[in-house]
Image (cartoon, grey):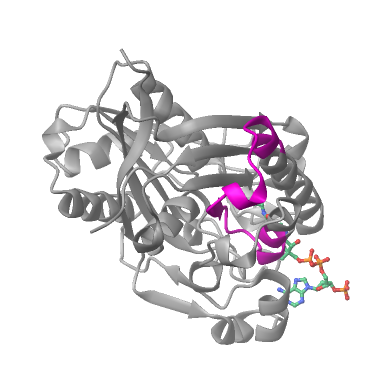
Amino acid sequence: MSKITAAITAVGSYVPDFVLSNQVLETLVDTNDEWITTRTGIKERRLLKEEGQGTSFMAIKAAQNLLEKANLDPKDIDLVIMATATPDMPVASTGVYVATQIGATNAFAFDLQAACSSFLYGMSTASAYIASGKYKKVLLIGADKMSSIIDYTDRATCIIFGDGAGAVLFEPNTEGLGLQDEILKSDGIGREFLKIEAGGSILPPSEETVKNKQHFVFQDGKTVFKYAVSGMADVSEKIMQRNNLAHDDINWLVAHQANRRIIDATANRMELDESKVLINIQKYGNTTSATLPLLLSDFENQLKKGDNIIFAAFGGGFTWGAIYLKWAYTKK
Ligand SMILES: CC(C)(COP(=O)(O)OP(=O)(O)OC[C@H]1O[C@@H](n2cnc3c(N)ncnc32)[C@H](O)[C@@H]1OP(=O)(O)O)[C@@H](O)C(=O)NCCC(=O)NCCS
């Protein structure tokens, strides 16, 4: 029997309608369009403004978009993995709710949290379930409502993040397409540099923590930047070497959209031509778990069966890694 690999066979996405531009941010904090554009590459981001709605709202829409495009019966899905750093609630699981809402009544579901690397880690997890032969259809959703944990008076973070969702379907492949190799890393040294201090088991929420704004994201941007540049570039270079891939062999770099300069540094280390680097950070900012599937969705028409893609991400924790995947279809 030929080896089973896990291939991506469909993608879907959703972003909220509300646009927060750099020009509007100029009215909220001491910043300007020129600084944000040159330091991050971001021009605008989307925010979920629907009253009483959380991450699941966007995740459901992205999954429904995929189901419709792929003409897939949700009852055929075996497993739903919900990659997110902003679950609807700490308990119960967001993925379980999403699975039920989309009609994936035969699936089991769970949440996976690895900050901005959640989706990348989710690709590894989904792929392992498929390659084991246990499951045939695994829906991986990456969604985050970052606006729910951002302080819009903190210019160090509010210029960067946005809300969004994307979804991919993993299925078995016997033609050698799909996930080929992965390097996943983590290092607890990162905990001090990118965190939400309160609301967890160390510092449960209180009047005091809210007053001190400890329920918002804190980031030491400069330090995270340094680790992100070396971390993402190192694993991307290593996965190329390990698979004997020269820069000409790579068709696309699908990298976490946190900062244009981090993506460029990774692409430079890989000696990749700019035309192979997928970018949509200017439209969405950093949507955390949604950046990679939003890229796949935006550029799906350009991806061809057999294309060699390197995925790379870096996030809080720290967590980071790279995945080498052969694309499995050409969209008609
Ligand atoms: C956050 C980030 C964009 C800041 O860019 P930076 O080039 O590191 O900027 P610095 O923090 O060094 O600040 C440079 C200057 O700009 C100023 N500045 C910071 N934020 C600003 C803003 N929003 N608008 C205008 N000026 C700003 C600083 O005060 C500093 O001024 P000074 O030189 O007079 O002291 C960048 O560090 C970053 O992208 N970090 C990593 C993000 C990331 O990858 N996260 C992990 C994945 S989730």
In magenta segment, residue 245:
yes
Left or right, 308 with reference to 225: left
Name the spot of residue 248 as percent of width and height, x first: 62, 52
Q: Which stretch is magenta?
A: 238-264
Q: In this view of the protein, which residue sits in the foreground, 241 or 184?
A: 241
Left or right, 282 with reference to 66: right
Q: In this view of the protein, which residue sits in the foreground, 201 or 325?
A: 325
Q: Is residue 202 above or below residue 15?
A: above
Q: Is residue 45 above or below residue 172?
A: below
Q: In this view of the protein, which residue sits in the foreground, 314 or 163?
A: 314
The quarter of the picture showing ligand 1: bottom right
Name the spot of residue 331 as percent of width and height, x first: 28, 56
Name the spot of residue 195 as percent of width and height, x first: 66, 45
For image coordinates 31% across by 29% down, the residue present is 173
| Residue 290 is at least partly visible in this image | yes
Q: Residue furthest top?
A: 1
Name the spot of residue 14 as percent of width and height, x first: 32, 61
In magenta segment, residue 217:
no
Q: Quadrant of residue 205?
A: top right
Look at the image and tell me in which quarter the N terminus lies.
top left
Q: Is residue 185 above or below residue 251?
A: above
How many discs mark residues in the rendered view?
A: 0
For image coordinates 58% across by 47% down, the residue present is 249
Q: In this view of the protein, which residue sits in the foreground, 157 or 234?
A: 234
| Residue 318 is at least partly visible in this image | no
Q: Quadrant of residue 237?
A: top right
